[in-house]
């Protein structure tokens, strides 16, 4: 009997030992298919990009935001920082910037994009006016790409997870970064400000963390839920740090552009919420949802749905800050991730490329193994895949529907983060 029992035990142990091998094989097979799907998606997008380039349609969009930064820097150098926000001057300077298109006869008209940021942020692109526009744009793209890579490496090292190069690159392979680089946006700076804010919390430097938040005054609407959240949770040191950082930014801006320059930048920023921006229906927010629903349902019903969604998201965010403010780093990352995702959904001006700000938060959760492994694949594949599908269905409405798809994606991130914080099994170490 003993011998027979031993045989059964050995057989059971052998079967048990094979289970991890089977799981490993399944995981490798899954990764292989995901790699293939990613390659196919990127290939389709590359063909699409080449087609756009050859038809000269890219001229209306490629480097659009950077053209505004470049013109603003030229105006600041030649006529003073307070003149940067003069729309007529912007139009004159941008019209004089040469665009070299493959076939200029088919080129779309250039879009005028104005720079509403405070005068201090004009300094960021000021050195680039020493170069011609095309060269300056390429240098700017390279600086942003390399800068983000090195910052994420620094971020991973600071949280004790150095050496994860492939994982960092995966999180960078996303539509949000591609769009930022294509348009020439400066959102990489905001990624750094958010990252340093988080690291300061982890290192128990609340004042320093709040100071870094001051940098978000570049796009103040990102603070509409963060600042009230800090107030509700009585984070006075962080708020003092923010006030100090904000005072420094406003002080330098005052020296550069005077009261007139600051007031002009505020007026222009307010106009971004109105008729100055014609792409509201493609935004990743409830405003975009309302505009799209209004094409099918009565306007009052469309806005009732959108406003109801806004109020629900805002109420949940404030509840989290009031009753679930964490002392442990993982919970804090979840809270900031939920707050940012909620902000992108409710703020009046929100394009999908703002999701770039979530990268350091998602990277932290990934490196600490606090999110499912397949999240990084969803991050890389969902936006381009949904756009390709929508474009094939209806090219004219693809941009608007894509905005709605990204709103759903953003709300999924918000809902998951909030659920983790509300769960009794939430990580607390």
Image (cartoon, rainbow, N blue to C red):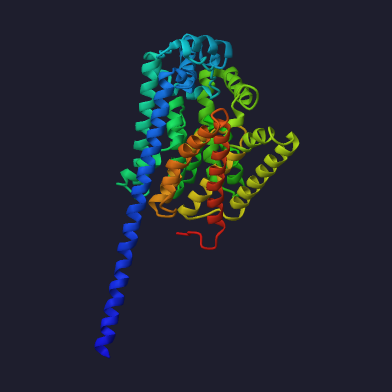
Picture layout, residue 155 above or below residue 104: below
Q: Position of residue 169 (x, y in %)?
A: 35, 40
Based on the displayed image, in which of its 4 quarters is residue 98 positioned?
Answer: top left
Count of labels shown?
Answer: 0
Left or right position of 35 against 429: left
Picture layout, residue 181 above or below residue 355: above
Q: Position of residue 178 (x, y in %)?
A: 42, 32
Can you name the residue that lies furthest to the bottom here? 1
Q: What residue appears at the point 51 percent right and 32 percent down from the top-left corner?
A: 391
Can you name the residue that lies furthest to the left here? 3
Based on the displayed image, in which of its 4 quarters is residue 166 positioned?
Answer: top left
Q: Looking at this view, is 376 or 269 the one in front?
A: 376
Q: Quadrant of the N terminus?
A: bottom left
Q: Position of residue 398 (x, y in %)?
A: 55, 32
Q: Mark yes or no: residue 245 visible.
A: no
Picture layout, residue 14 above or below residue 43: below
Q: What residue appears at the point 60 percent right and 48 percent down from the top-left corner?
A: 317
Q: Quadrant of the C terminus?
A: bottom left
Q: Looking at this view, is 333 or 96 the one in front?
A: 96
Q: Position of residue 100 (x, y in %)?
A: 40, 13
Q: Mark yes or no: residue 210 visible.
A: yes
């Amino acid at each position: 009997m003993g011998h027979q029992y031993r045989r059964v035990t050995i057989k059971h142990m052998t079967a048990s030992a094979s289970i991890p091998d089977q799981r490993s094989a399944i995981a490798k097979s899954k990764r292989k298919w995901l790699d293939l799907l990613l390659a196919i998606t990127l290939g389709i997008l590359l063909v699409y990009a080449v087609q756009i380039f050859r038809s000269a349609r890219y001229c209306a969009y490629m480097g659009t935001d950077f053209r505004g930064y470049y013109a603003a820097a030229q105006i600041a150098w030649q006529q003073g920082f307070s003149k940067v926000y003069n729309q007529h001057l912007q139009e004159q300077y941008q019209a004089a910037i040469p665009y070299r298109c493959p076939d200029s006869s088919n080129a779309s008209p250039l879009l005028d994009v104005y720079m509403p940021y405070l005068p201090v942020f004009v300094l960021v692109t000021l050195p680039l006016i020493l170069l011609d526009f095309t060269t300056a744009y390429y240098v700017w793209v390279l600086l942003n790409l390399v800068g983000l890579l090195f910052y994420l490496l620094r971020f991973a090292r600071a949280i004790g997870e150095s050496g994860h190069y492939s994982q960092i690159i995966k999180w960078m392979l996303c539509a949000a970064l591609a769009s930022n680089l294509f348009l020439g946006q400066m959102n990489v700076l905001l990624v750094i400000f958010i990252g340093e804010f988080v690291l300061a919390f982890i290192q128990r430097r609340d004042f320093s963390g709040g100071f870094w938040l001051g940098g978000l005054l570049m796009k103040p609407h990102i603070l509409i839920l963060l600042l009230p959240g800090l107030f509700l949770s009585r984070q006075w040191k962080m708020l003092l740090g923010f006030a100090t950082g904000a005072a420094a930014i406003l002080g330098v801006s005052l020296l550069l552009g005077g009261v007139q320059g600051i007031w002009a930048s505020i007026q222009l920023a307010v106009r971004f919420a109105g008729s100055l921006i014609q792409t509201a229906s493609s935004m990743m927010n409830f405003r975009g949802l309302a505009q799209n629903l209004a094409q099918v349902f009565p306007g009052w019903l469309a806005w009732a749905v959108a406003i109801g969604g806004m109020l629900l998201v805002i109420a949940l965010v404030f509840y989290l800050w009031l009753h679930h403010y964490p002392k442990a780093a993982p919970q804090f990352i979840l809270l900031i991730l939920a707050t940012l995702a909620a902000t992108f959904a409710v703020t009046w001006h929100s394009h999908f490329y703002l999701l770039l700000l979530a990268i350091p938060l998602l990277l932290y959760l990934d490196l600490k193994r606090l999110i499912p492994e397949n999240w990084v694949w969803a991050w890389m594949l969902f936006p381009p895949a949904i756009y390709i599908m929508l474009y094939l269905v209806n090219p004219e409405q693809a941009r608007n529907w894509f905005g709605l798809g990204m709103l759903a994606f953003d709300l999924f991130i918000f809902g998951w983060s909030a659920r983790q914080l509300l769960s009794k099994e939430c990580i607390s170490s």
